[in-house]
Amino acid sequence: MTTRSTLGAGALATVLAVAGCSSSPQPAYQPPQGALIPGTAQATVNGRDAGTTHSVDCMTIGPMTMISTGGDESGVYTMVSNAEGLDVKLLRLTDLGGFTGSYNQGLDGEATVSMTDRTYDINGTAVGFDLDNPSFRSTGDFRIKIAC
């Protein structure tokens, strides 16, 4: 009888210990205002909404972060440095909002970058062409938010 009582008390203690250690599920990550959920990107080019993608790859090597969104047919590739504050080194747009073009630091165009939480907010002007009229060089104003 003592063995049964001891086993029963031990089993009850184990059940209570496990129940006491369990925790409720963690709430889903909610980014602050102005930020996106990691792995998400949004783009606007020449005032045209180019949509949202959940295909985002970010890789950081030293002070440089390389970011790509979308795929070969439509997307963004950019390199952002944090060596001396945030700085866009290059940005390539492929068929976003009907525009394909690029910004390269020190050449044509301009770009600024800021960061909220894990989200890069990149704004500027790229040089390229509109897909509706590819024979003529044009500029594209862009606003891109990418969360790594």
Image (cartoon, rainbow, N blue to C red):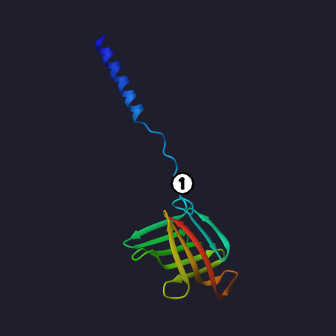
Farthest-out residue, right: 132
Determine whether 18 is above or below 132 in the image: above
What residue sits 39% from the left and 76% below the top? 83
The quadrant where residue 140 appears: bottom right
**How far across and down, in percent of the image, does residue 77 sit?**
52, 74
Tally of numbered discs? 1
User: Crowding near pointer 1: few (<14 within 10 Å), some, many (20+)?
Assistant: few
> Tag 1: residue type?
Gln
Determine whether 12 is above or below 5 in the image: below
What residue sits 29% from the left and 15% below the top? 3
What residue sits 39% from the left and 32% below the top? 18
> Can you identify the residue that label 1 sits on?
30
**How far across and down, in percent of the image, does residue 25 sit?**
49, 42
- Kindly tell me whether residue 127 is visible in this rendering: yes
What residue sits 49% from the left and 84% below the top? 105
The quadrant where residue 142 appears: bottom right
Relative to 56, 65 lies left or right: left
**How far across and down, in percent of the image, does residue 4 sit?**
32, 15
- Kindly tell me whether residue 70 is visible in this rendering: no
Determine whether 56 is above or below 137 in the image: above
Farthest-out residue, left: 2
Farthest-out residue, top: 1
The quadrant where residue 7 appears: top left
**How far across and down, in percent of the image, does residue 116 sit?**
51, 65
Relative to 33, 65 lies left or right: left
SS label for mark 1: loop
Give the quarter of the figure containing the N terminus: top left
